[in-house]
């Protein structure tokens, strides 16, 4: 249910000249010019990655897609189990691309989504995949922004570029998660549930969603998400058979070992767990710290979703909380933070920005440049900071919204109360 009309208040308070200037800049022609320049920079970076395939090292562009395409191609050729046997899967990648070691830790539902791309050559498949997912992400973010003159933010957000550069599914995550929030915002709870169910291939980003929906009494969305998740799993079972699901489950301990043993550099992790492990903190200490952050995120989501605030505020808290609650978030997954960015900017343009909110959003976004998302190999990064900052900014706005709306409701009740 869209509750924006129930919380149509203005956030009062003195704002700095910088914040006023930022608010004006966001919707100005100058902003579009800056955005165009940054888009050119991002496109050049992507083209360099493509050029490297043909005139450089020969590494396939958008290289993480090697895992997706090899899995899909194997499935198209009747070998459904190969993606879940790492050594054989890696050998197949080496045979095809002279590069291996890309694991496939996804459930068969994701393999089902990838099947059509296995029918195409790698280059055509990855370009089509990125074009579809980028277009879907931009469309959804435009729907969430509501103001087309603020949509330029979408095209310069580093996290989205990371998703394309790595050939990952993070843009699809944005499209599905953001699409569910847009559907709720427009009073379409069944569609929201279907989109959430379709995102079940990334279960670690969906852990908080059931708690949010139950706290918000979004019953139809909750059940639609459950039905969709089960339906997609059953379809994948019908296509690939029980043995494929069993192989996926048997591989789960190996996937956990990859994280605990840092088989992927901890500098690529964007979680509190990854941050502490970068500096050689014991696994138990890092996990304890991560569990504390996850508990705060869960409590915040349940509290905010149980309150009478707008879906845009609830959505910003939920998505940012989902990003800080999981230890297994990598730098390319930071694309999800485009959702709270757009929602906070939308709220700011509608009700006024909070003190230092614009500066916080800018800093949180720029800190993404201090990560390995651009394809570099730094030993130490600041990838853990953007999720924490976006969560703090989202939660701050949510708390102030709850307090402000509650105060104004009390004032209205006092005004309407009969005199004694």
Image (cartoon, rainbow, N blue to C red):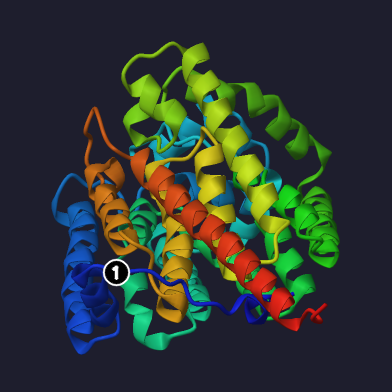
Residue 168 drawn at (x, y percent): 44, 52
Q: Quadrant of the C terminus?
A: bottom right
Judge left or right: residue 142 versus residue 6. Answer: left
Is residue 98 in sight in this rendering?
yes
Task: Name the residue located 54 percent from the left edge and 19 percent from the top edge.
Answer: 288
Query: Which residue was labeled with disc 1?
Result: 15
Residue 36, picture quadrant: bottom left
Work out whether residue 356 or residue 98 is closer to the camera in this orientation and state it.
Answer: 356
Question: Closer to the camera, 219 or 178?
Answer: 219
Image check: 349 left or right of 224?
A: left
Q: Residue at x 58, y 60 (%)?
A: 403
Q: Secondary structure at mark 1?
A: loop
Residue 265 visible (yes or no): no
Q: Position of residue 24 (x, y in %)?
A: 26, 82
Residue, x 14% and y 49% (percent of image)? 56
Q: Residue at x 23, y 67 (%)?
A: 16
**Within the image, what quadrant is residue 275 found in?**
top left
Q: Nearer the viewer, residue 75 or 366?
A: 366
């Amino acid at each position: 249910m869209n509750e924006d009309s129930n919380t149509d208040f203005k956030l009062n308070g003195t704002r700095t000249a910088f914040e006023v200037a930022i608010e004006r800049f966001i919707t100005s022609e100058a902003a579009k010019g800056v955005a165009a320049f940054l888009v050119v920079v991002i496109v050049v970076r992507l083209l360099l990655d493509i050029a490297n395939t043909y005139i450089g090292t020969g590494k396939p562009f958008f290289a993480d897609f090697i895992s997706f395409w090899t899995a899909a191609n194997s499935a198209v050729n009747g070998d459904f189990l190969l993606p879940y046997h790492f050594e054989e899967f890696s050998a197949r990648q080496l045979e095809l691309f002279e590069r291996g070691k890309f694991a496939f830790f996804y459930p068969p539902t994701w393999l089902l989504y990838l099947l059509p791309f296995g029918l195409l050559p790698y280059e055509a498949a990855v370009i089509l995949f990125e074009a579809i997912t980028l277009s879907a992400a931009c469309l959804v973010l435009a729907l969430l922004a509501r103001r087309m003159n603020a949509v330029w933010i979408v095209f310069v957000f580093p996290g989205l570029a990371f998703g394309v550069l790595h050939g990952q599914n993070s843009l699809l995550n944005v499209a599905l998660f953001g699409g569910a929030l847009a559907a709720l915002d427009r009073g379409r709870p069944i569609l929201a549930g279907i989109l959430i169910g379709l995102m079940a291939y990334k279960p670690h980003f969906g852990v908080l969603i059931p708690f949010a929906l139950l706290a918000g009494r979004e019953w139809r969305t909750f059940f639609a998400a459950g039905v969709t998740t089960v339906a997609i799993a059953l379809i994948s079972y019908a296509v690939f058979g029980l043995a494929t699901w069993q192989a996926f489950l048997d591989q789960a301990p190996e996937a956990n070992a990859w994280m605990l043993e840092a088989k992927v550099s901890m500098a690529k992790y964007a979680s509190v767990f990854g941050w502490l492990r970068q500096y050689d903190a014991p696994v138990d200490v890092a996990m304890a710290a991560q569990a504390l952050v996850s508990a705060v995120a869960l409590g915040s989501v349940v509290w905010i979703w149980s309150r009478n605030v707008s879906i845009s505020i609830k959505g910003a808290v939920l998505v940012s909380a989902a990003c800080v609650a999981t230890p297994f978030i990598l730098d390319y997954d930071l694309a999800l933070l485009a959702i709270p960015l757009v929602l906070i900017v939308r709220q700011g343009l509608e009700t006024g920005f909070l003190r230092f909110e614009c500066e916080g959003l800018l800093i949180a976004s720029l800190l993404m440049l201090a990560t390995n998302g651009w394809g570099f190999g730094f030993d130490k990064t600041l990838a853990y900071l953007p999720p924490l900052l976006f969560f703090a900014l989202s939660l701050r706005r949510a708390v102030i919204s709850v307090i402000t709306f509650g105060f104004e409701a009390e004032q209205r009740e006092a005004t309407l109360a009969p005199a004694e």
